[in-house]
């Protein structure tokens, strides 16, 4: 070993919050060796970043942690909707929305469901599972410096308590080190967007009597609009532990020191309308809502993910979900390149795909904050119309890159309405199927390899896929869908695979390991082996 290098890893992850931990989880599932360093001593102790949308939960389902997350989130399982009220004791209140899925339509679109799990409950699940998968995760360890060359990244990391430093050599570095990313700054990567939108102080507190005022209104959040004391109230246990987001105005000279325990407690009493309530302040943390996206997501062998790549208004929890989905998109591409079955150009598609999604999503998040009149936010008058189709943001985003063939470049990265038609560049639709007596979702098939799905008359595609995968040495799974006993997957009665995926019984679709459709054949081809060879070589940038 080079005497100037203490250890070597394929991937170094900088930052151990939600996105860094998710990257570790996804890399571990794919067998990619990595080291994660996090400067803080432990996972988050503050309840924040709680909304996990359908797409994120699908990713956690495939990664084997969905049930553990639901268990960690059980105390808030019955909380739904956003309430707006002048106080909790008055009669002036209404629901901005009462249910995430009032008609139950989402149940037919996904095997997963939206989950309310606070960051302080979610991160330990990710940490524990990532460690079980063999990930090396070091807390109280900070990135001091890094240099990169054509073959990798050399980083100096330091244990904050002992002061001991070590030199790490990695093939690639993922910077998941937050909105004030030191990695992004050192690389000189600029940002676009409107910048800071508003500021809040997140206050954790105990108040036993507050549950009586809340009553049976099990909300995700309640926007309290008392002009003398506005803010957002969020339950932690629906009993005595709560979070209150109080507007903060540093632009007027207001400092964090101004938020004394006494001031915070009095503000909470006025906002809730329970004026004689005993309030015990247990913690305070500032946060800043912004609309910023990095100008580029890659610099050589270094990639930005999560808040280091984009900042968003918190309404809708779009920021954390977008960051987790960044990590998922990048993990399989790193695994493919490091595994030798994809060309290095595949890594260029990470930013090409994820940056437009972040630009569109950050704008939607700001518009949703305006629509909800989020406390502390005074938006410009031209913010836009209602943001009703949250599903389009959560699951409808599209990719157009070299890792997709046949995507319409004119299609917006985030459309106005969610549709699931099997188009290249979109998330592959969910379909319940039976495989050897086991009921599973087609989404459960997409993780470690590309997958070719063929219809009941697609035997030529299926056979060609097996031969091409063997000849090109590409990990490729192939499944035939149909009612015949010789088929690999049997759809539920009454479902039509061809209609759902926009093809014919003779057609086929190629799905990437991240569950996005890379290519679609609507029918048969005279030379399926040649076509599949060209498709795979192109999609994998070989």
Image: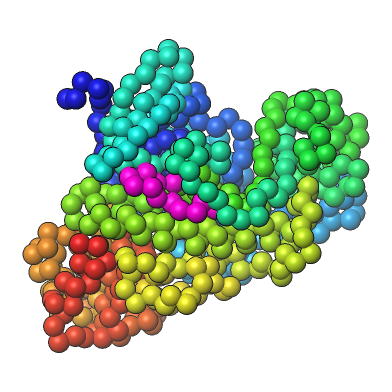
Determine if residue 70 is in view. Answer: no
Give left or right: position of 112 versus 541: right
Total numbered labels placed on residues in the image: 0
Q: Residue at x 57, y 54 (%)?
A: 192
Q: Quadrant of the N terminus?
A: top left
Determine if residue 198 is in view. Answer: yes
513 lies above or below 117 = below
Residue 81 in which image quadrant: bottom right
What colour scheme was applied to this rendering of the protein? rainbow
In this picture, which residue range is highlighted in magenta?
293-304
Q: Is residue 483 magenta?
A: no
Point out residue 430 in the picture as x, y percentages from the top left corner: 40, 68
Q: Quadrant of the C terminus?
A: bottom left
Q: Residue at x 50, y 39 (%)?
A: 185
Give left or right: position of 174 versus 278: left
Front position in the image: 64 or 371: 371
Point out residue 378 in the picture as x, y percentages from the top left corner: 79, 54
Point out residue 489 in the picture as x, y percentages from the top left corner: 26, 70
Q: Residue at x 74, y 61 (%)?
A: 371
Front position in the image: 44 or 540: 540
Give left or right: position of 474 versus 148: left
Give left or right: position of 477 versus 178: left
Residue 12 in which image quadrant: top left
Furthest residue in direction top, as rendered: 162
Point out residue 279 in the picture as x, y percentages from the top left corner: 80, 28
438 lies above or below 140 = below
Q: Is residue 294 magenta?
A: yes
């Amino acid at each position: 070993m080079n005497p100037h290098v203490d250890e070597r890893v394929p991937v170094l992850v900088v930052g151990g919050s939600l996105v860094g931990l998710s990257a570790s989880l996804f890399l571990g599932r794919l067998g990619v060796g990595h080291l994660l360093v996090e400067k803080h001593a432990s996972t988050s102790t503050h309840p924040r970043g709680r909304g996990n949308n359908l797409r994120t939960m699908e990713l956690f389902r495939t990664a084997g942690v969905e049930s553990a997350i639901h268990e960690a989130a059980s105390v808030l399982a019955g909380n739904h909707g956003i309430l707006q009220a002048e106080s909790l004791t008055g009669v002036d209140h209404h629901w901005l929305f009462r249910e995430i899925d009032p008609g139950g339509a989402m149940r037919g679109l996904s095997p997963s469901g939206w989950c309310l799990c606070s960051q302080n409950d979610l991160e330990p699940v990710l940490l524990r599972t990532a460690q079980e998968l063999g990930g090396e995760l070091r807390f109280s360890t900070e990135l001091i410096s890094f240099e990169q060359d054509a073959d990798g990244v050399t980083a100096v990391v330091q244990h904050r308590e002992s002061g001991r430093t070590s030199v790490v050599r990695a093939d690639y570095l993922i910077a998941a080190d937050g909105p004030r990313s030191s990695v992004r700054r050192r690389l000189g990567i600029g940002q676009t967007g409107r910048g800071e939108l508003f500021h809040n102080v997140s206050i954790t507190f105990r108040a036993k009597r507050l549950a009586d005022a809340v009553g049976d209104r099990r909300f995700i959040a309640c926007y309290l609009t008392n002009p003398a004391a506005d803010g957002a109230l969020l339950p932690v246990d629906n009993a005595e532990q709560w979070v209150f987001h109080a507007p903060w105005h540093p632009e007027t000279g207001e400092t964090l020191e101004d938020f004394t325990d006494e001031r915070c407690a009095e503000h909470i009493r006025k906002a809730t309308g329970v004026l004689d309530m005993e309030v015990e302040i247990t913690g305070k943390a500032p946060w800043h809502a912004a609309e910023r996206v990095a100008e580029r997501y890659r610099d050589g062998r270094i990639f930005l993910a999560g808040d280091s790549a984009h900042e968003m208004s918190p309404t809708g929890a779009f920021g954390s979900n977008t960051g987790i989905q960044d990590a998922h998109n990048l993990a399989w591409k790193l695994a493919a390149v490091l595994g030798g079955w994809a060309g290095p150009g595949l890594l260029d598609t990470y930013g090409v795909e994820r940056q437009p999604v972040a630009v569109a999503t950050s704008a939607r998040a700001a518009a949703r904050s305006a629509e909800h009149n989020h406390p502390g936010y005074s938006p410009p008058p031209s913010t836009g119309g209602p943001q009703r189709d949250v599903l389009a943001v959560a699951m409808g985003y599209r990719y157009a890159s070299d890792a997709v063939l046949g995507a319409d470049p004119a299609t917006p990265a985030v459309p106005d309405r969610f549709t699931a038609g099997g188009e290249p560049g979109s998330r592959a639709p969910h379909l319940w199927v039976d495989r050897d007596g086991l009921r599973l979702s087609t989404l459960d098939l997409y993780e470690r390899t590309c997958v070719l799905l063929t219809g009941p008359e697609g035997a030529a595609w299926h056979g060609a896929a097996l031969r091409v995968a063997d000849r090109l040495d590409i990990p490729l799974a192939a499944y035939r869908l149909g009612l015949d006993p010789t088929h690999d997957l049997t759809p539920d009665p009454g479902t039509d695979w061809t209609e759902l995926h926009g093809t014919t019984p003779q057609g086929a679709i190629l799905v990437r390991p991240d569950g996005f459709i890379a290519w679609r054949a609507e029918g048969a081809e005279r030379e399926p082996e040649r076509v599949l060879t060209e498709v795979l070589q192109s999609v994998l940038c070989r």
